[in-house]
Structure formats: C-alpha cells, structure tokens
Amino acid sequence: MTAVTDQDHTEQAGNAVPGESGDGERPVEEPLPEAEVEVEVDAEVEPEGEDEHARVETVSGPESGPERDEEGNVTPGRAPADGHARVGAARARRDAGSGSPEPVDAAAPADDDSADAWDDGLIARRVTAETEQAAVMEARGHNAPPAAPLTYDGPLHSRLDALRELVGLSRARLDSRTLAEAGQVLDEAAARRRLSGQHTVVAIAGATGSGKSQLFNSLAGVAISETGVRRPTTAAPIACSWSDGSASLIERLGIPPRLRRRPLQSAESEAQLRGLVLVDLPDHDSAAVQHREHVDRILALVDAVIWVVDPEKYADAILHERYLRPMAGHAEVMFVVLNQVDRLPGEAAEQVLDDLRRLLDEDGIALGEYGEPGAMVLALSALTGDGVGELREALGHFVTERGAPARRIAADVDAAAWRLRPVYATGRRTGLSEAARDDFAARLADAVGATAAGEAAERAWLRNANRACGTPWLRLWRWFDDRREPSTGRLPVRAQPDEEATARQRVEQAVRTLADRASAGLPAPWAQAVREAAVRGSQGLPEALDQLTARAGLPPGRPPRPGWWPVAVLAQASMTLLQIVGGLWLVAQIVGVMAPNLGVPVLLMVAGIIGGPIVEWSCRMAARGPARRYGVEAERRLREAASGCGRARVLDPVAAELLRYREVREQYGRVVGVG
C-alpha cells in the first residue's frame, strides 16, 4: 500500500463515460468546457484493523467500473483503483441529437430514478481530498493514546533552573537583547518538555540539488517529497511520522496537516524507526527568502538534524559559516551525510569523505568516531540505495535511545552560556578588599579633618590643664598675649569656603578611587553598575559628613578633668600663697611693723617662686597622657562617624552590586556545569 503524496497526475479521458439508466446506456452528447476538467486525489480512511496508512486512489478510464465491496455492492464516493498512482478524469459529452447537455455519472447505480441526478462523489472528493487527508492524520493523532511527556535528568534540570535564576537576577543589569537567547532557550526547553518524550524529531537539511528529498523518500520507503530537476523543488517542510502521538510535535514546527505523511507500511521499518518524526526542509541556500526562513525556524526546534551534502558543494562556505560552525556544540545530535557517492569513481568517495571530515574538524564539530560522542559522518547514495540501510540503522539506534531531545536542549544551554560568558566571567579576581575599605574610610576621615580634630582636642586638653595648674603670673601674661593683635608677619588664615571646596574634592576623589577598585576585573555591565552605585551614594555625602562632624566633634564646654586636678590646683595655690605671705612679711619688716628677720620671709618667697613652676611643669607632664587619649578618642569618634556615613551611602550599595554579581557568577557556574 503506498503513501499519500502531494503530487497530482492528471489524465483526461477522451471517450465518453457511460451512464446507466433504467433503459440501459445513455449516449454522451457534447464535451464539457475545458475549465470543468477536474483532477482528484482520494484519501481513504481505512477501517479499524486494516492498514492505517493513507492510500492514493485513482480514477481510471471508461473501461474500469465502480469499486465494489466484498458483497458486490457499489461503493459510492470512491474511484476504482488500477494499481498505479494516477488520477483519471472523466469528460461528459453531449449526444448529438440532444439539445441540452446532460450530466453523466460514471459510478451511478443502474436505477431510473438516479439517471438525471448528479452523483456528488467525484466532486466532493475533488474538493475535499486534501481536507480528508489532513482529517485522517489528525484523527489518528487524536485517537492515539497520549504520549508520555519528555523528562530531563537531574543535571540538565539543575542547569535549566540555574539559567532561569541567572536571567532573573540579570534583568536589571543587562539589556533584553543580551538575555534574549537565554530566554528563548528556556521557553523552548519548557515547550519541548510538555510534548512527547517517545518521539524524536529529525530534520533533513541540505543545499539545492544535494538529494535530501530523495533521501527522505528512500528512508520513508515511498515517494513522499517531490523530487526533480526544477530548483528549488521543496518549497515547504514536509513531516513523516513512523508512529502515532506526534501531532503536537509537528504542530510545534508549524507544519500544516496537509504536509504530514506516513511512511510505507513495513513491520521491520516501524519496529526499527518507531518514534521517529522526519522532516524534509527546503534548501538552505534557496533563492526564495521564505524557504531559508523555514529552514532557520525549524532547525531551532528539532531534536536532531541530518545534513545532506553532495560531492560538488560539500565545502560550500554558506553551509559551514552559517550553519555548521555555529552549531558545532550540537555535534551529538547531528548527522552529516555525503550523498550521490555513486557519481564518484574508484576511491574518490573515500577521499571526498576524508576531506569532509577535515572541514568538520576545522569547524569545531566533534566526530563520533571510535565510540566517542559527536556527529556521525556517512557516505551513501539515495538513488541506488547504497549506504541508506546503514543510515536507517544508525537512526534506529539514535531514536531508540530517546536521548536526543535532552541532548539538544543541553547543547542549546551550552551555546547560550558561551555567548553570555563575556558578561559574567573574567579571568581576574574581583571584589572589594579590606585594604580598599580602610583606605576609603581614611580618605573620608582626612576629608573631614579627623586627624586635625584630634590634635585640636589634645591641645585643648593641655590648654585647660595649663589654665588650671599654671602660675597666676603666667596665666595673666597669656591672657594679655591673647588680647593683643596678631603681628603683620603672620600668614593669613585660609578662608572657610576654600576649606569646604577642598573637603568636597577629597570626598569625590575617595569615591572615585573606591569605585575603580571595586569595579576592577568585573565584566563591563557589572563594572558600570558598581560605578553608578558609587556615584549615587556620593550625592550629598559632603553635606552629610559636615553634619556628622558637627555632632561627633568636640563636646561643648571644657574638656573633662582628671581626679588629681584639685590637688594640683591646691598645690599651685599654696605656692602662690607662700609668695604673697613672704612678700608681705618683707614689706612689714621694711616699714618697721615687724621685727627684722629676713630669713623666714625670703625662704617663703623662694619656695613659692620655685614651687609654682615646678607644680605647673609636673601638671603638664601628667596631663600629656590624658590629653593624648582625649585627642585620640575625638579623632576615633570622627573617623567612625565619617566611615559610617561613607559605608551607608557608598560602601553598602557597592557591596550589594558585588554580591549580586557573585550570585549571578555562581548561577553561571551551575549553568556551565562548574561548581
């Protein structure tokens, strides 16, 4: 039984078609117009238990009668078959003695009541032949039990989850065009997973004249795809399925029901290729743009591909640069067939085959030789059948494994990950070191003058100690000196606006330095995101630092005094009192109020004069430690305030970007299968 084809062969009968009536034969009067000569292809739905393949029914000439069933009854609506795939056309003629044309039904039963009525079987079949054929395929697909969906193993499932997470984390940092391929891989993987896992979709692709349609027909065992010298011959993809349940897979390819076929019925072929869905594609180098679009679209959806090349164009640059080289990672789901080897004399076929292997190796396509995974390279002749059996056997093992869909998805993930590598992976170590963080905090501290503030606090503490423990005469002199005008030889103090401008410049320089260090080694999109985060954080940072400096600087009032200060003040007051008592004693002796005795008052005055500076010097030595600690504490508070402000505004956003990059880098490692 032959398969249904798209080729219509028209045969016109030049003789009259006899009709039957109650009186016998009725003469045909005159021919119908040429426009009414019709061509028909009858697709028959076989009853259950018989062959499920479609059959080409033929309408023979006048000599063949209507088809009858097993009981001898005429079967209406069916044309007689003569064993050849050809279609007969019946032309009605009008009898010369009649004045008006009469329709003649060649398959009508011998009944007087139906003599003048049109039998609509021929017309209905002519109009709905293609629709019936599609309905047959659809009915079989719907009546077949649903095929089990495709399942992915653990590693591939984990890689797909990682790719989905990677795309989600990257949407805010990468443009949609960069992530488009990865998103398409995820969509196609999800779509393929919902469909049958018991079928493998294999496309046959090739250049013009390579003989791919002939190979397609040879594998199917019957002429399904049109062949010929006209170029291009195949205008639309044709699908052939060896088992039921593949309708959804073929619909995913966008192949309409009228272009879906079944192979020649053969128990051996069905057992060997069960689960195979073979698709004949148009020429990938066709001059018609629509043909090339069909090829590119379907190649992205099938599970595997058979590339058919011929001895003349096996090294075609279009084939290698546009298809084979970009699909080098899909070698495990790829067959490369050198067709038309019957045209090569002697050992020329082996030489061409070796050169083809060399070109494939240059394209980066791994060859499945010596049991290694990779593309299978074969030589055959679809015309003579030489080598076709080997390809059919290899396809049988390939389909039986049922691993091609998952391998195709894994190869797509590899290809998408490789193209995303420049935006996720670099060969340099990335991140923000502690040294960079400390340097940023130190730069901000310098910008707010933390060191100078600490020194000022230390000086203030010492000055307070001198005021409390110094001699009255020295304190009086310092008070008078502070009231005097500054000398003209001193340098003018820098104005406040200049200090603010310098502080702002230092802050900006600190932010730029941090951003450069944090983005060093990052891919361009993530480095740009780090810089943008640092710039956003630096806005308003100088003003915030000024406010923190005012709050965290020296506390108002005098610095705190240690517990020994009252003792030092009492000792200095005693020395001053001795000087006063000794002086008054001497004055009293001079005026004669008291008896002359120079020893005691002079001794008191000398003790007060010498003891006062000694007490002051002792207090100054004792005050150095607390003053230094006071200045260091003031500097620490200011540094911590500046560091906290810089961390909240700049370091944390930058660290968040680095953490996001670390997360996407980990997900990318899972996608490529590393880590």
Image (cartoon, rainbow, N blue to C red):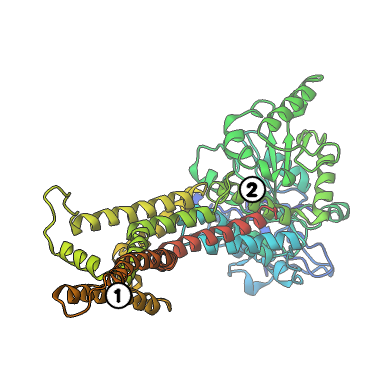
Judged left or right of residue 144, residue 291 is left
**Residue drawn at (14%, 75%) of the image:** 591
Screen quadrant of the C terminus = bottom right
Judged left or right of residue 335, residue 502 is left
**Of the pair 348 and 151, the residue shown nearer to us:** 151
**Of the pair 352 and 346, the residue shown nearer to us:** 352
Residue 282: quarter of image: top right
Q: Look at mark 1 in the image and give the residue it sits on.
A: 578
Q: Is residue 130 something that shows in the picture?
A: no
Screen quadrant of the N terminus = bottom right
Q: Look at mark 2 in the image and give the residue it sits on.
A: 7
In the picture as drawn, the residue positioned furthest to the right comes out as 268
Q: Secondary structure at mark 1?
A: helix
Disc 2 crowd rating (10 Å Cα; few below 14, some 14-19, many 20+) is few
Q: Earlier in the sequence, mark 2 or mark 1?
A: 2
**Residue 463 location (% of width, % of height):** 30, 66
**Of the pair 651 and 81, the residue shown nearer to us:** 651
Residue 360: quarter of image: top right
Dot in front, 2 or 1: 1
**Of the pair 357 and 540, the residue shown nearer to us:** 540
Q: Is residue 530 above or below residue 520?
A: below
Disc 1 crowd rating (10 Å Cα; few below 14, some 14-19, many 20+) is many
**Residue 543 location (% of width, % of height):** 28, 66
Q: Is residue 487 above or below residue 162?
A: above
Q: Secondary structure at mark 2?
A: loop
Q: Is residue 195 above or below residue 432?
A: below
**Mark 1 is on which residue type?**
Leu
